[in-house]
């Protein structure tokens, strides 16, 4: 079986930078994922949203890669959110406790809505 | 491949995959196809697939050192009460699993490597996991109980 390709693209939205992920998140995804995350970090967004809608497989190495992104986000005091995970991968985010640190939403609309709410709650400078 | 019934214990398939990165998905899909007719709930099937993929990946990486000529053998069998998937590599000595229980906060603080989720995922996804081995092989057996299976509303296995 050919190993499925992984792609990640960065999209700028008012609520933050969105990483549109496609394919399989395994060891082969590391380079592309890290490069896309570095691109997303440019312009210092308050939040980065991981879009898993077109991800059909995440293995334990992929979980480790997501842990690495979370560590980078925390070091930069940046919110990390995820949406579009299948029910199975929501369960994996729960049992690994990733969902304690990454805000998990069913879809982009709810993720963006939460971000807007967070922005509105921030005290004015 | 289907073998004849052996009493109430049926061998449903005997499969093998070369030890090449990515082949765990091939193993996972083959096992899913094999158990398709057993009526597993979708959530349970997804758990079994993840456990098979992780155990196969471990066998290819640690048991067979990603030598392509070294096969990972997968035997799927069932009784009325359970499904068993036995995953065997060509490694010697104790089966290599990271013994450290993953702790996400420790990983985020750099006290643990970000990796090391494989065994944890396997144990979380199936009802039993047994590891055996000799001087030429390791076998990881994954067992799903079919009767009286209860799942908590958050998707976690009932203990």
Image (tube, coloured by chain):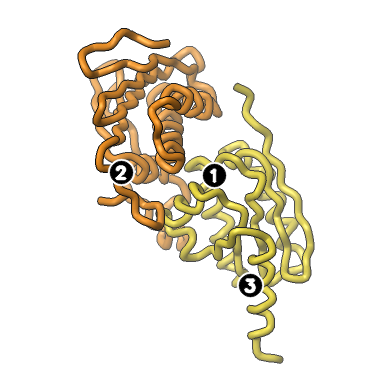
**Dot 1 or dot 3, earlier in sequence:** 1
Measured in 3D between alpha carbons, the distance from the residue under mark 1 to the one under mark 2, in whole angstroms, is 19 Å
Q: Chain of mark 3?
A: A
The answer, for residue B136, to whether it is visible in the render is yes
At 64% across and 56% down in the image, what residue appears?
A50
Q: Chain of mark 2?
A: B
Q: Chain of mark 1?
A: A
- Residue A90, image x, y percentages: 50, 53
Furthest-top residue in view? B4
Say few, some or many: other residues with alpha carbon within 10 Å of mark 1 (under 14 / 14 to 19 / 20 or more): many
At 48% across and 12% down in the image, what residue appears?
B69
Q: Is residue A39 above or below residue A24?
A: below
- Residue B21, image x, y percentages: 54, 27
Closest to the observer: B84 or B10?
B10
Q: Is residue B114 above or below residue B64?
A: below
Closest to the observer: B24 or B116?
B24
Measured in 3D between alpha carbons, the distance from the residue under mark 1 to the one under mark 3, in whole angstroms, is 26 Å
Q: Is residue A15 toward the left or the right of residue B152 in the image? A: right
Chain A: colour as depicted? yellow
At 43% across and 15% down in the image, what residue appears?
B15
Q: Which residue is mark 2?
A: B99
- Residue A60, image x, y percentages: 47, 42
Q: Residue B154 appears in which quarter of the rendering? A: bottom left
Measured in 3D between alpha carbons, the distance from the residue under mark 2 to the one under mark 3, in whole angstroms, is 39 Å
Question: Which element is circle 3 on?
Answer: helix
Q: Which residue is mark 1?
A: A62
Q: Is residue B145 toward the left or the right of residue A17 in the image? A: left
Q: Residue A120 appears in which quarter of the rendering? A: bottom right
Q: Which residue is mark 3?
A: A114
The answer, for residue B140, to whether it is visible in the render is no
Q: How many numbered circles does the render carry?
A: 3
Which chain is represented by orange in the image? B
């Amino acid at each position: 079986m050919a190993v499925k390709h992984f792609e990640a693209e960065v999209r700028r939205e008012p609520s933050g930078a969105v990483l549109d992920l496609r394919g399989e998140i395994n060891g082969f995804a590391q380079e592309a994922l890290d490069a896309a995350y570095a691109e997303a970090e440019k312009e210092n967004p308050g939040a980065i949203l991981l879009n898993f809608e077109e991800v059909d497989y995440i293995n334990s190495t992929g979980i480790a890669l997501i842990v690495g992104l979370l560590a980078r986000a925390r070091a930069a005091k940046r919110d990390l959110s995820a949406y579009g995970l299948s029910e199975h991968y929501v369960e994996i985010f729960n049992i690994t406790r990733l969902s304690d640190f990454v805000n998990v939403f069913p879809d982009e609309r709810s993720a963006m809505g939460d971000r807007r709410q967070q922005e509105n709650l921030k005290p004015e400078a | 491949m289907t073998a004849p019934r052996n009493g109430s214990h049926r061998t449903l398939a005997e499969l093998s995959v070369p030890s090449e990165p990515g082949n765990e998905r091939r193993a996972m899909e083959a096992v899913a196809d094999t158990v398709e007719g057993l009526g597993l709930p979708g959530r349970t099937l997804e758990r079994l697939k993840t456990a098979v993929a992780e155990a196969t990946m471990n066998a290819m990486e640690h048991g067979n050192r990603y030598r392509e000529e070294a096969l990972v053998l997968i035997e799927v069998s069932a009784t009325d009460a359970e499904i068993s998937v036995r995953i065997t590599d060509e490694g010697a000595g104790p089966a290599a699993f990271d013994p450290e229980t993953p702790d996400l906060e420790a990983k985020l603080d750099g006290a643990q490597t970000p990796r090391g989720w494989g065994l944890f995922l396997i144990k979380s996804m199936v009802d039993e996991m047994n590891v055996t081995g000799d001087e030429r092989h390791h076998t990881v057996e994954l067992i799903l109980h079919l009767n009286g299976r209860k799942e908590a509303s958050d998707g976690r296995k009932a203990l």
